[in-house]
Image (cartoon, rainbow, N blue to C red):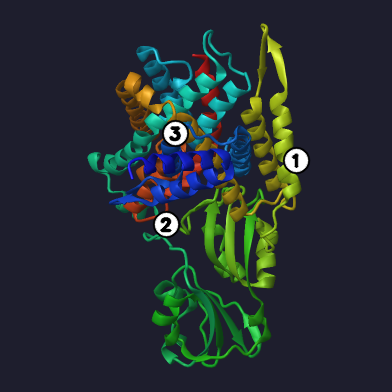
Amino acid sequence: MEKYLPGIETGIIELLNAQHVLLLFLVLGVGYLIGRIRFGSFSFGPVAGVLFAGLFLGHFGLRISSDAQSIGFAMFIFSVGYQAGPRFFSVLKEDGMKYALLAVVVAGTGFSIAIIGASLMTLQPGTSAGLLAGGLTSSPTLAAATDAVQQGIVPVQEGWTRDAVINNIATGYAITYIFGLAGLITVIKLLPQWLGIDLAADAQRLSSDSSEEQRPVNVTTRCYRVTNEEITKMTVAELREKYWDKATVVTLTRDGDRKRLGDYEYMQIGDHLEVIGPRDFFVKVAPMFGEEIPPDWHISDAIDTAQIVVLNKQVIGKPLSEIEVQRRFGLMIARITQLGIEVPHSNDIELGKGDILTVVGNASQIDALGEYLGHIERDISETDMVTFAFGIVFGVLVGLLSIEVGGVAVGLGTAGGLLASGLSIGYLRSKRPTFGRLPDAAQWILMEFGLLLFMAGVGLRAGGEILATLAQTGPSLILAGIFVTITPIFVGYWFGRKFLKIEPVLLFGAITGAMTSGASLAVVTGAAKSSLPALGYTGTYAFANVLLMVAGSLILLF
C-alpha cells in the first residue's frame, strides 16, 4: 500500500498538469468550499479560499495557463472600472468629495507603511507590492502590480527576472492577506467597543424617523372594501401616522375612479383599496380596513416590477423623502442599490448618479417615475456583449500606448488601460442608459469569475515559493502586514472624525470601502443592526479601487 500511494499521487499530479481546465475548476470548487468554512462569525470567503487552494496545489508544481489568468485579469479590471464609472466622476462634484478624501488618506497611509516596512526589512523586489495588496486585502492592487511587471512598465532590478519579481508579489500577498482579512474584520469589530461607540444607537439616531425603513419582503397585492367605521373617522394623515409602515402603497378607488386623498380627507364606507406591500402588513394592519375582496378592476393585472436608474440631474443629491415615490407615484420601493450594494430605505438617503431603485406597482406609474428619475430597465437580462468585448479591446490597446520620458517608456499598461476603458463606458452608460448594458447579475459573475480566475493563477504561482519565503522573511513580513492593515484604520477613523466630521456609523462603513472589504462591511452592518454603513462604503469604494490600483504600480518604483 505504501508503494502504491505515491503512484496514485503522481498520477493525479500528471493528470492535473495535462488538464488545465480540470485544474482550474478544481481550485475554484475547493476554494469556494474553504471559503464557506466558518469560525464563529468569521469565514474566509471565496477569494481567500481560492488563494489557499491554489497555494496548496501550487506547492506540487501545478500551474494554469498564463493566458487563462490574463483573461480573468481583463474581465475583473474592466468590470471594476465599469461599476465605479458613474459614481467616480460625479463624486468629485458632490458632497461625496469628503469620502474621496478619506479614501486618499487610507490608501496613502497603507502605501507609506508598506514602503517603510519594505525599506527597513530590505525585502526582495516586488514583495512591497504584495505587502500592500495583502495588508489592505486589495485584489486590484495585486492585479495592477503584477501587470506593471509583466508589461515591463516598471523596470526590473538587475539580477532579477520578471517572473521572479511576480513570484515575490504573489508570495508577499499570500502571506500578508491572511491577517489582512482576519485582522481587518477583528479591528473593525472591536474598535467601536474600545471607543465606547454604540453603532446601533448611532444608526437609529441618524435615521430620519428614528427607525430605519427595512427592505420589504414577500411582496403581494390584495384588495379590500372599507367596512370599518372607525377607520373612516380618522384623517389620511392620522392613518398614515398610526398604521403606515413607510413602504406599503395603498390606492383608493371610489365610484369607479381612482382618487388621491389629501392629508385631511377621510375614507368612506364602500371605498375599494388596492394594497401593495409585504405580507406582514396584511396580517397586522390591512384587515382593519374591512373585508378582503377579489380584484375587480383590470389594472391590477398590470402590476409590474422594474429597475429605475437615477440619472436626472434635478434629483441627484435630493433625499428620498422629497421624491415621495409612494405618495406621488403610488409605487413601492423594494430595493435601493449603489455600486451593487443594497443601502437603507431611510427617507433621508440622498440619491446619487447611477443608483438603482427596484420598484413594484402599476406599469404606467413606473413609466412616470422612470421619466422623472432617469431610465427604466425592464428587460434586464440581456448583456451588451459588443460593448463589453470592444471595451476590453480598447482598454488593452490603450494600455499598449506609451511615451518616452527621459529614455523610459511611460504608459498606463494593460491594467490602467482596462480600468480607464471600464470607467469611461460605465460613465457613458450613466449618460446614455441604452448603451453598454451590463445587468447586475452579469456584472457580478464577470467580476467574480474574473477575479477568482486571476487569484487561482496567483495561488498556484505562489505555492511553489511560499515556504521558502516564509522561512526567509515570514515573521517580519507578517509583522509589516499587520501594520499595513491596522494603521490605516486608526488614521482613517481619526481623520474622518476630526476633519471630515463623518458620523461613526457611516465612517466605519467608509473605512471598509476604502479598504475594498465587503466582508468587513457585513461586520459593521451587523453591529449597527442597520444597512446605513453601506452608504459610507459606497462613498469610498469607487474611488478606493482606482487609487489602490495606481498604488500597486507606483510602489514598485520605491
Q: Position of residue 476 (x, y in %)?
A: 31, 21
Q: Which tag is nearer the camera, tag 3 or tag 1? A: 3
Is 40 on the left-hand or right-hand side of 411?
left
- Where is mark 3, residue-wise? 60
- Where is mark 2, residue-wise? 208
Disc 3 + disc 2, Cβ < 8 Å: no
Q: Quadrant of residue 10?
A: top left
Q: Quadrant of residue 475?
A: top left
- Where is mark 1, residue-wise? 390
* Mark 3 residue element: loop
The amino acid sitting under disc 2 is Ser
- How packed mark 1 is, by other alpha carbons closer than 10 Å (few <14, some 14-19, many 20 or more), is few
The amino acid sitting under disc 3 is Phe
* Mark 1 residue element: helix
Is 132 on the left-hand or right-hand side of 546?
left
Q: Which tag is nearer the camera, tag 3 or tag 2? A: 3
Asked if residue 523 can be seen in this view, the reply is: yes
Residue 556 drawn above or below residue 418: above
Q: Position of residue 443 (x, y in %)?
A: 61, 49
- How packed mark 2 is, by other alpha carbons closer than 10 Å (few <14, some 14-19, many 20 or more), is some
Q: Which of pointers 2 and 1 lies earlier in the amino acid sequence?
A: 2
* Mark 2 residue element: loop
Of residue 398 and residue 465, the one placed in the foreground of this image is 465
